[in-house]
Image: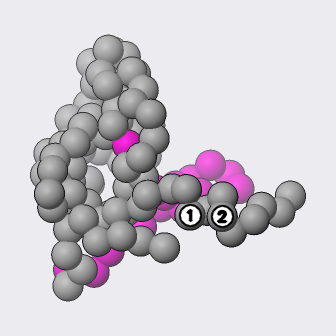
Amino acid sequence: MSYDVEEFWKFDLRVGLVKRAERIPKSRKLIKLLVDLGSEERIVVTGIGDQYGPDDLEGRKMIFVVNLKPKRLMGVESQGMLLLAEEEDGRVHLIEVGEQVPLGTKVW
């Protein structure tokens, strides 16, 4: 399936730093992240807790989608989405951003 490039431009991708990460109680996969996007901080919930722990995520600079509608997961409102690379077998990999890239920088 092919999409027009205009579809891609609808997503607002930004560089953010995970300041804090914690498991969501009673969930095997969900981790709540406090993300610094430069001009603001947001809560983002990610479902990679079966492969990564909070300590693996804190202090990492990664890419987030910031213009999605908020979604409530296990009682926590997620205000974005973490971008990852996923293999066919379901294994995920973090996509880190270089230290020199300022927080909040637009990604395209």
Give the numbered dot on residue 9: 1
Q: Which residue is mark 2?
A: 6
Main secondary structure along the magenta-highlighted residues: loop
Please state which amino acid type lies under the numbered disc 2.
Glu
The question of residue 95 being in magenta is answered with yes
Above or below, 100 against 92 in this view is below
Q: Are marks 2 and 1 in contact (CB under 8 Å)?
A: yes
Query: Does the stretch in magenta take in 96?
Result: yes
Would you say 24 lies left or right of 69 here? left
Question: Is 81 placed left or right of 39 in the picture?
Answer: right
Query: Residue 43: which quarter of the image?
Result: top left
* Image spot of residue 77 (x, y percent): 32, 25
Between 34 and 107, the one nearer to me in the picture: 107
Neighbours of disc 2 within 10 Å: few (<14), some (14-19), many (20+): few
The magenta region covers: 80-99
| Secondary structure type for disc 2 | helix
Q: Residues within 10 Å of mark 1 (few under 14, many from 20)?
A: few
43 and 70: which is toward the camera? 70
Q: Is residue 88 left or right of residue 32?
A: right
